[in-house]
Image (tube, rainbow, N blue to C red):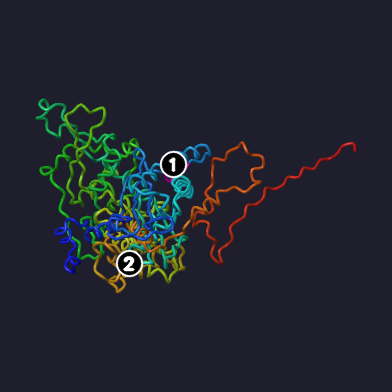
Amino acid sequence: MSTVTATPRRLASHDSGNVPTTPQTTRVATSHIVQSSPHYQTTRRHSLYGTEDRIVIDPGSRLWKVGFSGEGKPRDVFTAEEHGSSLWTLNRATKPAEREGEDKMLEARLQDRLRAVFHDSLMTDPKSRKVILVEHPLLPLHIKDIIARILFDNLQVPSISFASSHLLSLLAAGRITGLVLDCGHLESTVLPIFSSRPLFPHLRTTPLAGMRLSSHIRALLLLFGTYIPPLTSLSGAANIPAATRSMRVPEEVLTGAIIEEIKTRCCLVGESLDFSDGGAGRVMSPSGDDSFEHDLPPSSDPASMSESEFSRVSASEMDSNYAASSGFSVVSRSQVHPDGPRPGETHLQALAEMYKRHSTATDLHMQVDPPKDQQVGTGKGTLIIPGWIRERGAEVLFEGGDVDESSMAEVILDSLLKVPVDLRKTLASTILVVGGTPMLPGFIPRLQAELVRAINSSAPTSTRPPSRPGRPRPDPYDRYAPLRPLLPYFAILNNPSPPPPTSTSFVTNAGRAPAFTPATMAWVGGSLAGALKTGGVEVARERWDEADVQPEGEDDGMEGIVDTSRSPRNVLPDWTRTPLPVGAPPAPRPQPAPTIITLQTEVGA
């Protein structure tokens, strides 16, 4: 009997007349089937609304990342573009009728995306899942209201937690204090965070981001790229060389998908060029020391020129007029040698020649679909991407000088100048770079070098005599003089190749962030916040419904008029409506319109 109890399988085999018992292994395997997520092999507890795994949604104007909390990577990453354009832009119509039409179209597109998140990507019931919304600090409030309206009224989620993307990215890096640069598609934003408190008044932004990089690469390819159309037949034109058939790149070839593939799979960020001392053949290392300088190879001679060099159009046709007619602008303040363009050479030609001299990247041949009016050949066309465009196309992100378009380094330094003095050293040593654009190879080391370069280049070098004799000349303006003592402490947490250490805090911070990709740092932070049952401001559906109820007596006989311009509710978190700090001047109140009194004189009273 003891033997039968120890081995239930022998009981079933020897005594076939008895009722067979369920093996113990089958009972254990059955318990593993009951689970809330395929990524977990144990039974999860359930909350009041359902499973505890929250839905983490990171909505962007171009890319969306969705998944469950507690997991290390998103379940699905998809493009939310509509016919090649982003869901929303930085511009909004001024007329009420046009604005209402834009909002209705945006609401219809967002509803399709959000329903696809729950039904297609995650395949879960939205009524039993709380949602963590990773929001950008500059996300327009009307877009936030549309997303909340769809989630509450259409999908009926229990609650929505609004959390700052910069704070979640810092949480994924294991820090609660730092300076976060988020370089997305529409804009790049820098936000300092101290003890898990975002310092929103010190936020700085620049439009130099992924969209500007895409338009810049497209303009360079239209000017300096080469397109080889397909053969018209397999036998008639087989012996025609490709250099004879080459032509300028048609605009129809450079679609949004092609530009995005070129940017993500072909481009890289080269090291910074130093022209401060007239040395045109030196490349500065990310650390900025002169020991890393090396001579670049000379330009290729005509005998060793590639096919794209032979097929490029004449220099007289490559002018700024073509760029203006194509509708895509090239930044005109690019760094050109101090000697300037040569006689008979435009700025763009000088820029191309300089980048070709200081570039070691090779040309790439990409197969693309020919334009519709040329689809008579046999196969696909060939797009030749010059190597210097692959390596130097991202220079537009590091060339500042404009008040409205600061570079990546300038926007970080400007934010550091605004924070209190006692926080600058801590924030400068804990810089975190996130977003899709920083995934370009060499972006973060180049940003480290640009920070050092921007601080050193702001030092005054003018020796002009005083304007009035007998009076001392005033000190010249030094923009980043307060930050120059902090140069040994600048460190980027997720720098894959940090320069040699120069201070203790630099050793403990540079390159110490977890190996998450910069594009998913915000989502990983939201997943961690959902697993720890923490997050931002949580808005329950009951609170949303209470705010939706209109008090009685406010219609005043306007039953037939429908207010289509619904303003965002006050229950949604908005850092722009936070109270002013102590000592700040009060906000100006609107002054009533002046009353005009008309004096009438009675005649013959």
Left or right, residue 238 beside residue 226: left
Residue 378 x %, y % = 16, 29
Q: Residue at x 28, y 34 (%)?
A: 252
Which mark is first along the chain, 1 or 2?
1
Left or right, residue 51 beside residue 501: right
Q: Quadrant of residue 497?
A: bottom left
Residue 334 x %, y % = 31, 50
**Total numbered circles:** 2
Residue 397 x %, y % = 32, 52
Which image quarter is the N terminus in? bottom left
Residue indicated by mark 2: 490
Viewer-closest of 104 and 95: 104
91 part of magenta stretch: yes
Which image quarter is the C terminus in? top right
Q: Residue at x 59, y 60 (%)?
A: 586
Looking at the image, can residue 574 be seen? yes
Viewer-closest of 456 and 62: 62
Q: Give the residue type at disc 2.
A: Phe
Q: Residues within 10 Å of mark 1 (few under 14, many from 20)?
A: some
Residue indicated by mark 1: 106
Q: Residue at x 48, y 50 (%)?
A: 141
Query: In this rendering, is residue 112 above or below 9?
Result: above
Q: Residue furthest top?
A: 236
- The answer to whether marks 2 and 1 mark residues whose Cβ atoms lie closer than 8 Å is no
Tell me the magenta residue range.
Answer: 88-92
Left or right, residue 577 beside residue 381: right
Query: In this rendering, is residue 141 above or below 500?
Result: above
Q: Quadrant of residue 527?
A: bottom left
